[in-house]
Image (tube, helix red, strand yellow):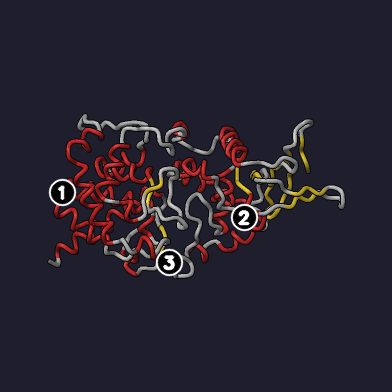
Amino acid sequence: MLLSTKGRTCKTMITTMPMVEIDAYFSAQNIRSELKWIIDAATNATNLDKVKTIQAELEERVVKGEVFAPLSITFAVEGKPVLDGTSRSLLSLAFNSSSTHIVGNVLTFVAICRMLGIKTFLFSSRLSAKEINQKSLARQRLAMEDVEVRVIFDDEKGLNAADIVHLFKKSALFDTVLNLPHVSESNSLCGEDGFPLRPFILQLIEETDIDSYGGVSFDAKHVKVSESTITTQYVLFKLLVGAVAGAGTQEYSKMPKDITLESGESLTSVLAGGYMNNISVFMKGWLKSLKESFVSNRSGYQLSPQVWQALGLVIHQLVKDGMLPDELENAGLLLGKLDYSKNAKHWQKCPVMELDSQGSIYKNAASSTRLFRLGLQTYFLKVISDDACHK
C-alpha cells in the first residue's frame, strides 16, 4: 500500500514480511551521527527492561493462541529510491539497505533483532551458545511471524540526513515507550559549547598527552574503528564523574550541569582542589602501556567506553582506599599491560564476560551497561590486589 499527500513528494509504503527477512532489506546498525548521543542515552537499564518485556511478549505469541495486534516498525530511506508502480500489479521500491534508518518503534525493532541474534546499534544482540540452545523452537516460529513495515521515502527529491533526524525525533515523540532521559541535552552533548567539566577534560587531555595516542573526538559519543581517536569528550566526562563520585552519580550525570556531592561540595571544586592529579597519573600510566595497541588493535576493548568509565570507578575506589599518586600511576601501568583483545583468555576471570556462540571472542554478559562497568571495576581491582599480594 502506498500513502502520499497531494502536493508533497514524501511517501510511505506499507508492507508486511516475516521477521527473519527484515535484516535482508533494512540496516539494523545504521544510525545518523547526529543521533548517536541519543542512542547512547537510550542504552540504559529502563530501556533494556522494556526490550526484555517485548521479547517475553514475542515468545508468548508463538506458544499461545491469544489475539494480538501485529507489530509495526518504521524505516526511512536516505537518498532517492526507485519507485515502480507501472510494470506490475504490485508496487515495488528499489533501494540500498545501507541507506535505511530505523525511525519508529525502535525498542520493538531491537527486541526482534535480539531474539533473532541480529546485531543492532542499541544493546548487545550477539547470542551466546546457551541462548542459542534455549527456546530455539520459539525463535524459529517467531522468525516466520509477519511484521508490518512502514517505509518512508522520497523518490523525487530524496530524503537527506536532516530529514532522517527529524523523522526519528518526531517518531520518538509518539513512541512513548522509549525512555530518553537526556534529550534535553541535545544542544550541548556533542558541541563545542562550554559546560562545567570541560576545562578539566581539556586538562586531562593535556596532562596525559592523549593526543599522542590518537586524540579525542569532540563530536561523537563513541570512537570509530576506522579513525585514529581513542576516546571521546563524553566518555572522558563520565570517567571524571565516576572517578570523583562513583557509579551512581556517573550513571545519571548530565554534561550541562555541575554536580553537588553528598559532602555538599561541587564536583568541579573537588577536581580543582587537587583530585585531578589522581586521575591524570593513573590514566597516564594506563595509556603508556597501551600505546602500540591503540594503533594495531582498533577492535580491542581498550577503545570501549565502558572500559574507560570503569577505569574512573577504579580510580574512585583506589583513592578512597588511600592510594598515593605514585601507586596510582603503577596501578594504571599494571592494568594497561592487560591484553585488551576480545579473544584474550584472561577475560574468562572477569565476572561480566562470556564467550560468544562461536566460542571465539568474549562479550558483555551483564544485563545492563552499568552492571558491565561495575563488573569490570571489580575485575580490575582484583588484578591490582592480586599483583600486590605477589610482591
Instruction: Give whichever of discs 3 and 1 has the lower sequence position.
Output: 1
* Nearer-N-terminus badge (1/2): 2
Counting from the top left corner in percent of width and height, residue 305 is at 38, 51
Q: Nearer the viewer, residue 33 or 364?
A: 33
Instruction: Check disc 2 and report the residue beneath it.
Output: 63
CA neighbours of label 1 inside 10 A, class few (<14), some (14 to 19), many (20+) = few
From the image, tell me which residue sits under label 3.
361
Residue 271 seen by the camera: yes
In the depicted structure, whether residue 121 falls above or below residue 363: above
Of discs 1 and 2, which sits in the foreground? 1
Q: Position of residue 326 (x, y in %)?
A: 14, 53
In the shown orientation, is residue 106 left or right of residue 11? left
Q: Amino acid at mark 1?
A: Asp
Residue designated by label 1: 321
Secondary structure at numbered mark 1:
loop
Mark 2 and mark 3 lie on one chain; the one further toward the N terminus is 2
